[in-house]
Image: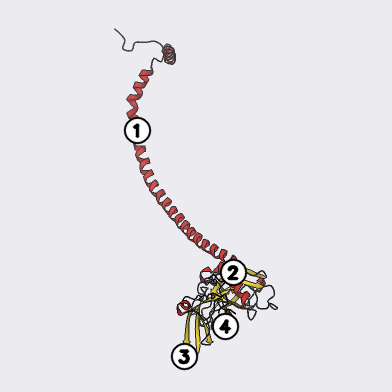
């Protein structure tokens, strides 16, 4: 009878044969690439199992990335909005700085006399009293500011300092009703006093004779009288001339060249010797004022008029000397209308005509 459990090769023999077989397969695969096709086929056959096994993890990662991406996008969007707001504010500040830079350049370019010194100052606040027109600036006596010091900007005269503290000063504007300013008409050197009537109205030139030669459009500049304001700085332009028949005088209004309600940066002036400085004559004031107006406000300068050349009409005749002598007042009416003298020719004898002697 055949036993149920037959006895086979020993375990040691089986292990030895397996090792030998494995070594043969390794050498054959490494040297001859015998199992490359088999390995490729097996990889292809089991590749779907990798996708199936990796599917749940991909799904979970995708859901997590979706929520994470949405949150990151919201954070990035909020950060970009804040950055855009900051950039927009910086852009607005840049535009304001450019305007301030332009104002400062215009102030620094304001023409001065050789003996004048200037300092830029900024308006800190304006007076809230409707009957007092003053501004506070950021310079005081530690900067050398003194009472009565003239204040201008790139357009003309602003006012004068009336109170000085350590770090601030108070400036009275030329439009204040208590302020008077000696001025000069640039066209004909007439000197008058301009009185303020409130910053909502023009300056007043009152109590002038009816025959005062001041016209609309005339430029008014500082005359230098009184020793407070340097001469030649633009103050106002005449806006209206009204004759008061009851009082037999002329009331003149002049619009300031400076926008007194839109002040930001100003210039403080220091004459070299404000105590002994004598005012210049009107001709010199006119020359200085024109030089400053060419740089500050060339549009308000009156047009330069040159006198027309006087032409003489000479007519030659067969006389001995061959010259003619015009007689004034003896021209016909047609020649008088044409503004040219009528030549008087010599008689045939060569004697001079009447009026030529």
Q: Residues within 10 Å of mark 4 (few under 14, many from 20)?
A: some
Where residue 231 appears, x then y in whole percent?
A: 62, 75
Q: Quadrant of the N terminus?
A: top left
Q: Is residue 193 left or right of residue 29?
A: right
Residue matched to label 1:
53
First reached walking from the N terminus: tag 4 or tag 2:
4
| Quarter of the image where one finds residue 66 | top left
Q: Is residue 40 above or below residue 50?
A: above
The reply to whether residue 141 is in sight is yes
First reached walking from the N terminus: tag 1 or tag 3:
1
First reached walking from the N terminus: tag 2 or tag 1:
1
* Mark-to-mark CA distance, 4 and 1: 104 Å
Which dot, 2 or 1, sits closer to the camera? Answer: 2
Task: Give the SS element for disc 4.
Answer: strand
Which dot, 1 or 3, sits closer to the camera? Answer: 3
Q: Residue drawn at (33%, 29%), measured in percent from left and top? A: 49
The reply to whether residue 179 is in sight is no
* Mark-to-mark CA distance, 2 and 3: 38 Å
Residue matched to label 4:
192
Task: Give the SS element for disc 2.
Answer: helix
* Mark-to-mark CA distance, 2 and 1: 93 Å
Residue matched to label 3:
245
Circles 3 and 4, Cβ within 8 Å, touching? The answer is no
Q: Residue drawn at (51%, 59%), measured in percent from left and top? A: 94
First reached walking from the N terminus: tag 2 or tag 3:
3
């Amino acid at each position: 009878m055949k036993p149920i459990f037959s006895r086979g090769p020993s375990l040691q023999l089986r292990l030895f044969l397996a090792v030998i077989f494995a070594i043969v397969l390794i050498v054959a695969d490494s040297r001859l690439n015998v199992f490359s096709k088999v390995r490729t086929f097996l990889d292809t056959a089991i590749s779907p199992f990798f996708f199936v096994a990796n599917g749940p993890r991909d799904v979970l990662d995708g859901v997590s990335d979706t929520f994470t991406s949405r949150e990151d996008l919201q954070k990035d969007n909020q950060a970009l909005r804040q950055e855009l707001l900051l950039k927009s504010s910086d852009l607005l500040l840049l535009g304001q700085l450019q305007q301030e830079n332009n104002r400062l350049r215009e102030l620094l370019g304001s023409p001065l006399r050789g003996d004048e010194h200037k300092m830029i100052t900024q308006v800190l606040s304006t007076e809230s009293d409707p009957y007092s027109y003053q501004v506070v600036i950021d310079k005081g006596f530690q900067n050398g500011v003194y009472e009565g010091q003239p204040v201008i900007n790139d357009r003309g005269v602003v006012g004068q300092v009336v109170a000085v503290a350590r770090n601030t000063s108070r400036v009275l504007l030329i439009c204040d009703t208590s302020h008077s300013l000696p001025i000069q008409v640039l066209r004909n050197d007439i000197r008058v006093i301009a009185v303020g009537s409130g910053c909502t109205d023009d300056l007043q030139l009152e109590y002038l004779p009816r025959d005062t030669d001041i016209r609309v459009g005339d430029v008014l500049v500082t005359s230098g009288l009184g020793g407070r304001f340097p001469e030649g700085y633009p103050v106002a332009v005449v806006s209206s001339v009204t004759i008061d028949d009851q009082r037999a005088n002329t009331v003149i209004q002049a619009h300031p060249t400076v926008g007194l309600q839109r002040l930001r940066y100003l210039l403080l002036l220091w004459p070299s010797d404000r105590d002994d400085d004598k005012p210049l004559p009107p001709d010199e004031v006119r020359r200085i004022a024109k030089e400053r107006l060419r740089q500050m406000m060339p549009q308000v300068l009156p047009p330069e008029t040159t006198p027309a050349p006087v032409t003489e009409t000479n007519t030659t005749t067969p006389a001995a000397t061959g010259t003619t002598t015009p007689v004034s007042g003896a021209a016909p009416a047609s020649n008088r209308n044409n503004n040219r003298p009528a030549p008087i020719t010599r008689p045939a004898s060569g004697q001079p005509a009447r009026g030529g002697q």
